[in-house]
Image (cartoon, grey):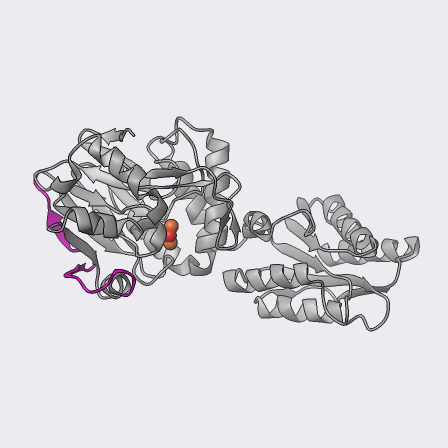
Amino acid sequence: MKATQVKENIYWVGAIDWSIRNFHGYHTGKGTTYGAYLIMDEKITLIDTVKAPFAEEMISRIRDIVPLEKIDIVISNHVEMDHSGALPNIMELCPNAAIYTSGPAGVKGLTAHYGQRDYIPVKSGDSLSIGKRTLTFVSTPMLHWPDNMVTYCPEEKILFSNDAFGQHLASSERFDDEADLSVVLEEAKKYYGNIIMPYGKQAQTAWNTVNSLDIEIIAPSHGVIWRSHIPAIMEAYALWSNNEPETGAIVVYDSMWNSTDAMAKTIAEAFRDCGMPVRLYNLKSNHYSDIVPDLLTCKYIAVGSPTLNSQMMPSVASFLCYLKGLSPKNREAFAFGSYGWGGQSIEQVEKELETCGFHICMDKIRIPYIPTQEQLQQIYTNVSDMLK
Ligand code: FEO
């Protein structure tokens, strides 16, 4: 397989995962890529590797440029196995290659995954000369693991950003100006929402660091390489990491006999008629990770569930559990649902929304069995009044 030239003597040697559809709970509808980069300098340097099953693909792309055994240096920006999984292959084939990683978290992580070895720890601000070029390391802890760092090459003005600025997107195009930018930005938003949102403060710190560097190329380890639309992705990260959406609503629910469905549609209609952009998500037909991008940029969230055996629907519980982990906060929220008797689900949903850090902006809406037209009209009025 061929390497792709990023700049003179710098190559993308990663792998394309066309088939993956679940990345530990994240629905990767468009697959993904694992970005690894080869720098041909006095010291031949490999930045990150790929997921283990794709080791041969990476190795064949490297061999398109240089015998693999000639690699002198490996930089591990991030221990997670989608980027370090092929490290054992490199260790075996290049036993003398020096492996640099963040210290102490990267050393600890690599040791736990691949055993004891003389990993070389680096810290933020450290630089490494590889010949004509220098590599400078910038620590980005908890973006999204403790070990994360990014690597900057000032002579080439390239940032090897690992997970940051990435997208789960399998494509034959390697650069942002070759792909459909709207798709790339949509996938970058989904990636941010599902992976990076819990670490918004760290993302802002990283954004400030990156913004202070002279950058012509951002080479992430997922998706396409940014070279023509860096302002667009930087602007988007600034907005998302600010996490203070001013408008927009999502209505998320499941339903048993269409009563909660009717309530959800009435609520969505009320938002819309008040001039609030709204998205309606039935959890029967939407994966929770596909809902998160809209949550990222919306101010209101309404969540509905009928009562099933004294509980909320499992699909709603699953969505709320996922949401709690992402810790979006700074949203206005309320619960709704129909029930036959008991009706515990609506209060359970409200409690979970509070646990997510949302402000409850309206009393929960509970309707026994089937909502009448009058009750739906009252729901519409209540939501409209709340938005005044
Ligand atoms: Fe793409 Fe955190 O690994």
Q: Residue at x 14, y 61 (%)?
A: 118
Residue numbers of the magenta segment: 112-131
In the shown orientation, is residue 106 left or right of residue 334? left
Q: Position of residue 341 (x, y in %)?
A: 86, 71
Which quarter of the rendering shows the C terminus?
bottom right
In the shown orientation, is residue 333 left or right of residue 64? right
Q: Position of residue 57 (x, y in %)?
A: 31, 37
Question: Is residue 330 among what the camera can see?
Answer: no
In the foreground, 147 or 192: 147
Q: Position of residue 228 (x, y in %)?
A: 35, 30
Work out which residue is located at the far top of the displayed protein and give it.
178
Which quarter of the rendering shows the N terminus?
top left
Q: Position of residue 275 (x, y in %)?
A: 70, 44
In the foreground, 235 or 6: 6
Question: Is residue 300 among what the camera can see?
Answer: yes
Q: Residue at x 37, y 57 (%)?
A: 143
Inspect the magenta stretch and tell me whether residue 126 lies in it: yes
In the shown orientation, is residue 117 left or right of residue 265? left
Inspect the magenta stretch and tell me whether residue 135 lies in it: no
